[in-house]
Image (spheres, rainbow, N blue to C red):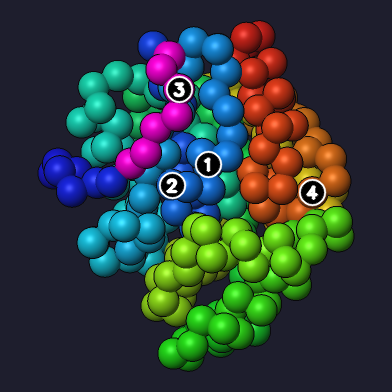
Amino acid sequence: MKNTTALYRTRGEGRKKILCIHGTGCNSLHWLKVEPPEGWQIIAVDLPGHGLSKEDPLDSIDEYATWVRNFIIDLGERVLLAGHSMGGAIAQSVANSYPDLLSGLVLACTGARLQVSPQLLDLCRGEDTTPIARFLSKYAYGKNVSQAQITQWQEELGTPPPAVYLAGFTACSNFDFRDKLAAIQLPTLILYAAEDRMTPPDYAKHLHAQLPYSTLAEVKDSGHMAILEQPGYVSEILAEFCEDKI
């Protein structure tokens, strides 16, 4: 199966590649706030149903992992695979099933088990995105982010229909990788935010304890959307990891 319709955006011109996977309801633009390290190029994809993708959204992390695997094969080279939130779950699944395609992992604001609020799932079963956006505005950002900034990001980056959120959050709810982590033998950067209420810091600390070649780093003054809230700091941590570990 070829990903002939996959849409992606790039930043940088480096020979080495970082393939970036976004979270539920997000798209390739979210990762493009992060600056690639010197010598690296960021490739950020729109997952099925997200961004400008014309494909139907998927409701399984394994299905998304197969999609990403096919994208990497089409790309024709090994990548450092970076995933935020649901993207981090997808990255873990790819690393477990197809490690030869990867040079390493970046897991941002994610966990080995992603529990989604029943309230949020119920909101996603409706026909209006407004309650979903209101919920995420309350819980997905750090305390220093203003509502005006959140609204600007929502307008700039776009908001998918509720069905896309429902598929993604259903995939997250069914994801449990806790008994498979130790099999991942790749150098891994784990990023967490102290103010993250959707994937709390304990999620990242569990990942770090179970992944034998992992590095743990805190993104300061940030909530769950760290790649938007603190892209400069994320860029610095990423550059250090790529220089030291990859």
Q: Which mark is residue 12?
A: 3
**Inter-mark Cα distance, 4 to 2:** 20 Å
Residue 163 vertical position relative to residue 101 in the rendered view, above or below: below
For badge 2, the amino acid type reads Ser
Q: In the visual, does 117 lie left or right of 96?
A: right
Residue at 48% x, 69% y is 159
What span is colored magenta in the figure? Answer: 8-14
Asked if the residue at tag 2 contacts the one at tag 1, i.e. Cβ–Cβ closer than 8 Å, the answer is: yes
**Inter-mark Cα distance, 4 to 3:** 25 Å
Report helix, strand or loop for mark 3: loop
Q: Which mark is residue 28?
A: 2
Q: Position of residue 202 (x, y in %)?
A: 80, 49
Report helix, strand or loop for mark 2: helix
User: Of callouts 4 and 1, which one flags the residue occurring earlier in the amino acid sequence?
Assistant: 1
Residue 84 vertical position relative to residue 138 in the rendered view, above or below: above
Front tag of 4 and 3: 3
User: Of callouts 4 and 2, which one flags the residue occurring earlier in the amino acid sequence?
Assistant: 2
Asked if the residue at tag 1 contacts the one at tag 3, i.e. Cβ–Cβ closer than 8 Å, the answer is: no
Asked if the residue at tag 3 contacts the one at tag 2, i.e. Cβ–Cβ closer than 8 Å, the answer is: no
User: Of callouts 2 and 3, which one flags the residue occurring earlier in the amino acid sequence?
Assistant: 3
User: Of callouts 4 and 3, which one flags the residue occurring earlier in the amino acid sequence?
Assistant: 3
Residue annotated with mark 1: 31
User: Of callouts 3 and 1, which one flags the residue occurring earlier in the amino acid sequence?
Assistant: 3
Report helix, strand or loop for mark 4: loop
How crowded is the residue under tag 2: few (<14 C-alpha within 10 Å), some, or many (20+)?
many
Q: Which mark is residue 222?
A: 4
Which quadrant holds the C terminus?
Answer: top right
Asked if the residue at tag 1 contacts the one at tag 4, i.e. Cβ–Cβ closer than 8 Å, the answer is: no
Q: Nearer the viewer, residue 213 or 43?
A: 43
